[in-house]
Amino acid sequence: MEINFVREQFPALNSGFVFMDNAGGSQILGSSVDYISDYLIHSNVQLGASYKVSAMAGDRLTKVTEQIAGLLNTRDIKEVVIGPSSTMLLRILSLCLSAQWKEGDEVIVTNTDHEANVSCWTDLKDKGIKIKIWKVDPDTLELKIHDLEKLLSSRTKLVALTHCSNVLGTINPIKEIAAIVHDAGAHICVDGVAYAPHRKVDVQELDVDFYTFSWYKVYGPHLAVMYGRLDLLTEMKGINHYFFTPGDVPYKFQPGNYNFELTYGLRAFPEYLIKFFDMHFPHLNATAREKYRKSFELIAQYEEELAAKLLNYLNSVSQIRIIGHTEAEGDLRVPTISFVHEKLKSPDIVAEVDKENIGIRYGDFYAKKLIHDLELEKYGGVVRVSLVHYNTMEEVDRLIEAFQKIF
């Protein structure tokens, strides 16, 4: 992978600071900033009017939505719901979807998830919905399929889980899980926030019913997207004004509308993936979808090399315990790496790294149930290093050198 080409696309990387808290928020593509500015200067009007600038604004946003739909491989652009955050989109989904449920119906959540895809469902207990917890195996730190099968019943309406843990870095087999959930007559809702920066999301291939992630962690502005199957979105009650019809998708899930200029900035990411492909594979002819896939494959390969360098060092320190897979294999994990030290508190470790102009983080990362169940609170949570493909081997070396001063 041409790392210099990649880093040229992200202006913030010129600061000299080392960004390794990317699971909390990645740096934004320069082209996204340019598009946001361009929208505000040339088409900052309300949609739906008859005059020329409004028509142009609407056309711009429709084309961006089509690009996002192509990136996610949705069946219809109406299946793309833009919102302020994954947390808000999932909360809206829980309110709208549960309006169809009855007292005694069941939802399964995991103890590995960020609370965005947990609290919105567990709060339904007040409406008589029964909540079941799919717990991670404490030895392997994986979600076991046979444990899910024990929890499923004829009353199960939804299984909500993460595609990839924002603490463990572990990738869950969503396609396999979706098949089991559907065989049980239930729906599946996937939080892809920690997965989407590292791998291509194909909602049809995964066969999921709902899928959400945050763009500000996928090289864009502070915005999020939710995919929902059109038939499910259509039959659901919305959360917008009374005069919207069932077919007003996705607008009936976007009270107060969505952010136009930030949405226009989203066009930068699919365009970046195509530019990335053209840079690395100049003699290959391919469709946009193939270019997305091939670009992500190269990104994943490079990120595995980054993770291997860091994990090899951490594995060599006897007092460090990695929380998650200890190897860098790309089929099992993304380069979001968490650990604890037997004698040092996580906040103290991070405070020392801060002095080196390197940004990492400690805590529970809103995966509070996981940190509690693994008894990691006594360390002050975990130390988390979250790498992405614009990080360099030299930056990883700098981090290792910082750790060596501490350990």
Image: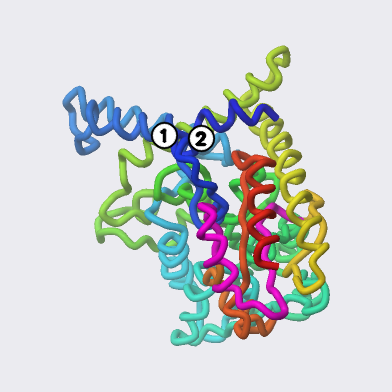
Q: For the residue marked with disc 1, what is the amino acid?
A: Ser
Q: Nearer the viewer, residue 182 or 27?
A: 27
Q: Quadrant of the C terminus?
A: bottom right
User: Residue 315: x, y in percent?
Assistant: 81, 63
Residue extent of the magenta highlight? 333-361
Q: Is residue 112 above or below residue 280?
A: below
Residue 270 placement (x, y as % from top left):
53, 32
Question: Is residue 187 visible to the viewer in this orientation of the structure?
Answer: no
| Residue at 35% over, 41% down | 262
Q: Marks 2 and 1: CB-CB under 8 Å?
A: yes
Label placed on residue 269: 2
Q: How far across and how far down the image is residue 27, in percent?
A: 48, 44
Residue at 50%, 68% in the rendered image: 116
User: Residue at position x 52%, y 28% from top?
Assistant: 8
Is residue 338 depicted above or below 288 in this figure? below
Q: Residue 37: tell me if it is visible.
A: yes
Residue, x 70% and y 62% (percent of image)? 182
Mark 1 or mark 2, which is nearer the start of the sequence?
A: 1
Q: Looking at the image, which residue sits at the far top?
A: 283
Instruction: Report the coloring of the rendering.
Output: rainbow
Quadrant position of residue 332: bottom right
Which residue in the structure is indicated by mark 1? 32
- Residue 348 rendering spot, x and y as whole percentages: 56, 73
What residue occupies the far front of the structure in this picture? 405
Q: Quadrant of the N terminus?
A: top right
Q: Secondary structure at mark 2?
A: helix
**Does the magenta portion include 132?**
no
Amino acid type at circle 2 is: Phe
- Quarter of the image for residue 111 reads bottom right
